[in-house]
Each structure stands twice: as structure tokens, then as C-alpha cells.
Amino acid sequence: MEKADHSRTSAKPLPEDDEMRLPPRRVIHSTDSAKATRIFHASLVVLLVLLAAGIIFWYQFYGQ
């Protein structure tokens, strides 16, 4: 078997410091917190409307 040639001429040059930097964490692992918050608030409004409609229906049907 032949030994690998580890001379500097065959090695690739190292990338610049700017190329080795990682992007910010929020870019790699982006969150959809605004979307989740909007969905959560919309679901609370829907539940509130259903609760109010249910109370009104219950009172009309069984109240008198």
C-alpha cells in the first residue's frame, strides 16, 4: 500500500475567518412564535364565543 502524501502543495487552503463563521442561531433554528401566538389567541377567542353561545343557549332552553 502507498502512503498518503501529506505535503502542503496537495492540501486545500483553509477558508477565511468570515467564511468559517456560523449564522446566528435564530436563522438556523427559526421559531414561529408569532404564528403560534396568533393561533393561540384565535383559539381563545373562539372558545370564548362558544362559551357565551352555550350559556345563552342553556339559559334559553333550561332557564324558564
Image (spheres, helix red, strand yellow):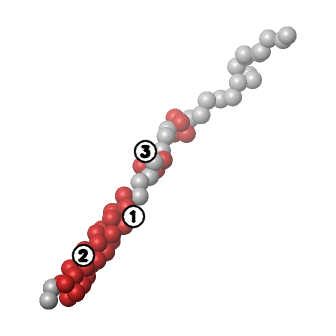
Give the mark nearest the N terminus, 1 or 2: 1
Front-lying residue, 14 or 45: 45
Q: CA distance from mark 1 to mark 2?
A: 24 Å
Residue type for callout 2:
Leu
Residue at the far left: name it: 64
Residue at 42% across / 49% down in the picture?
A: 26
* Residue 35 place in picture, x, y as percent: 39, 64
* Residue 39 place in picture, x, y as percent: 36, 67
Residue at 22% across / 87% down in the picture?
A: 61
Residue on which disc 1 sits: 35
Residue at 75% across / 23% down in the picture?
A: 10
Front-lying residue, 60 or 35: 60
Residue on which disc 2 sits: 51
Element type where label 2 sits in the image: helix
**In this rendering, the label closer to the viewer, 3 or 1:** 1
Q: Is residue 45 visible?
A: no
Element type where label 3 sits in the image: helix
Give the mark nearest the N terminus, 2 or 3: 3
Residue at 44% across / 52% down in the picture?
A: 30
Residue on which disc 3 sits: 25
* Residue 50 place in picture, x, y as percent: 28, 77
